[in-house]
Amino acid sequence: MTSAPGVSDLRCARFARGVPDRLAALAGPRDGTVSLPLHLAWSGLRVFDLDQPRLRMSYYRIVLAEGMHDDLEKYLNRDLLVTMWPTLRTLISRDIRDVWESAFDELALSAQAAA
């Protein structure tokens, strides 16, 4: 008899379904003002100035937590994600962090180098 998957297992499976095949697929904006659709930013701020570090970090947290595959590719930028990852990984859930670092060695190595 097998036990039912836990909440963390279910969350990890959900996040893993959205992760792109490669980081290069993340072709989102690097700067400027971006408005997130309601299905991503359903509570609170929806317009983010990516030139402001705090707003950029909030934007990435929202997209990583709420975005599906197409959202991740459209709204995240590979270079920004890699640069921000050492700090960002401390602000997101363990499930998101584990899924992304398992999928992309570059992120895991970036986090290790910053430690």
Image (tube, rainbow, N blue to C red):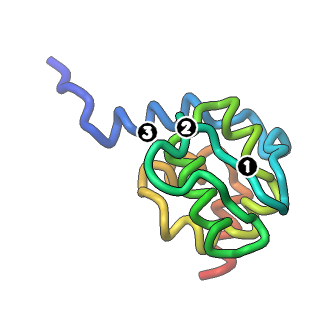
Quick check: 103 above or below 34? above
Relative to the observer, which residue lies in front, 104 or 62?
62
Say whether residue 28 is left or right of residue 63.
right
Report crowding for label 1: few under 14, some 14 to 19, many 20 or more residues within 10 A (C-alpha): many
Q: Which residue is mark 2?
A: 38
Q: Amino acid at mark 3?
A: Cys
Mark 3 and mark 1: Cα distance apart in space:
19 Å
Q: CA distance from mark 3 to mark 2?
A: 23 Å
Name which residue type carries label 1.
Leu
Determine crowd level at label 3: few under 14, some 14-19, many 20+ residues with C-alpha closer than 10 A. Answer: some
Q: Which residue is mark 1?
A: 76
Residue at far top of view:
1
The residue that mark 3 highlights is 12
Q: Is residue 4 left or right of residue 111?
A: left
Q: Which mark is residue 109?
A: none
Frontmost of labels 3 and 1 is 1
